[in-house]
Image (tube, rainbow, N blue to C red):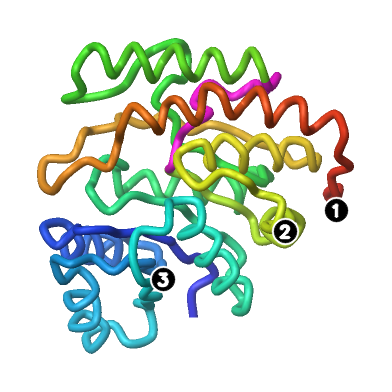
């Protein structure tokens, strides 16, 4: 039994899914993996089921019908994970944009250094560590993150990062029914909520590499949700009491 599990949401990731699973299982630390697949028509879930025969205790699968949103995929994963004894729960993409070896540093930040949330950050020290993105997307992402920091008061530099380690206590404290966003703004809302609950957040610098295989799920609407949603998030926080960290 591992104390750590990585949640990977998937939709049409047949080119990447076996490679990412094997790369994680090849790490010196034992991680378990939970794939949350949104009815991928390309057979992503079928590949996972085949691999479960090889890794029956370490590889898990939730199948959902249709694309229900990134946020709901992670919440489904969080609820599943909390039924078991995992102490460190990770978010990660399937497309190798998040460097697999950095899982070890995220784990160490929470398990050894006392942080509650560790974020794989593209923007630590005002350096944009992104490979193979068009310049327009780099600038949009970088300045959107600065905007989110300004509105929310969060001190972290990469507010939209999707490469994250949570201590179990963080997810047990957050009321998932009050998480409103389903797209990439979900990542902002989770970090903001963890901060408001009194948890300690830190960033681990990473180099983000744009996917080499498969199709990106990013769109202009995703950034619009993040840009306008954070204002509602901040205003809503003025009228809400957040449960607090207990240890």
- SS majority, magenta: loop
Q: Considering depth in this image, is 63 or 153 the residue closer to the camera?
A: 63
Magenta-drawn segment: 152-162
Q: Which of 195 and 127 is in front in this view?
A: 195
Q: Are marks 1 and 2 in contact (CB under 8 Å)?
A: yes
Q: In this view, does 177 lie above or below 212?
A: below
For the point 16% across and 44% down, which residue is it? Answer: 215
The label on residue 169 is 2
Relative height, residue 226 to residue 186 (above, below):
above
Q: Which of marks 1 and 2 is nearer the N terminus?
A: 2
Q: Along the line of sight, which residue is nearer the eye, 182 or 78?
A: 182
Q: Left of 86 or right of it: where is 175?
A: right
Distance from disc 3 to disc 2, alpha carbons, whole Å, reads: 19 Å
Is 240 on the left-hand or right-hand side of 163? Answer: right
- The total number of labels drawn is 3
Q: What element carries label 2?
A: helix
> Which residue in the structure is indicated by mark 1?
247
Q: Which of pointers 1 and 3 lies earlier in the amino acid sequence?
A: 3
């Amino acid at each position: 039994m591992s104390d750590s599990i990585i949640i990977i949401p998937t939709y049409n990731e047949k080119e990447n899914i076996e490679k990412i699973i094997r790369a994680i299982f090849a790490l010196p630390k034992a991680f378990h993996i939970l794939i949350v697949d949104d009815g991928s028509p390309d057979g992503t879930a079928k590949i996972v089921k085949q691999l479960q025969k090889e890794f029956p205790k370490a590889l898990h699968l939730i199948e959902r019908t249709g694309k229900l949103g990134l946020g709901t995929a992670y919440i489904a994963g969080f609820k599943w994970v909390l039924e078991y004894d995992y102490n460190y729960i990770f978010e990660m993409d399937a497309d190798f944009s998040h460097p697999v070896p950095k899982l070890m540093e995220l784990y160490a930040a929470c398990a050894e250094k006392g942080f509650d949330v560790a974020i794989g950050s593209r923007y630590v020290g005002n350096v944009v560590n992104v490979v193979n993105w068009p310049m327009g997307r780099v600038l949009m992402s970088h300045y959107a993150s600065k905007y989110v920091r300004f509105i929310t008061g969060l001190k972290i530099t990469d507010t939209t990062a999707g490469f994250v380690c949570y201590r179990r206590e963080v997810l047990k404290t957050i009321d998932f029914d009050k998480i409103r966003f389903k797209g990439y703004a979900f990542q902002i809302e989770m970090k903001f909520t963890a901060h408001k609950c009194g948890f300690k957040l830190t960033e681990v610098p990473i180099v983000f590499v744009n996917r080499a295989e498969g199709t990106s799920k990013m769109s202009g609407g995703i950034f619009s949700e993040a840009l306008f949603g954070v204002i509602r998030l901040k205003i809503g926080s003025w009228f809400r009491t957040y449960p607090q960290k207990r240890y």
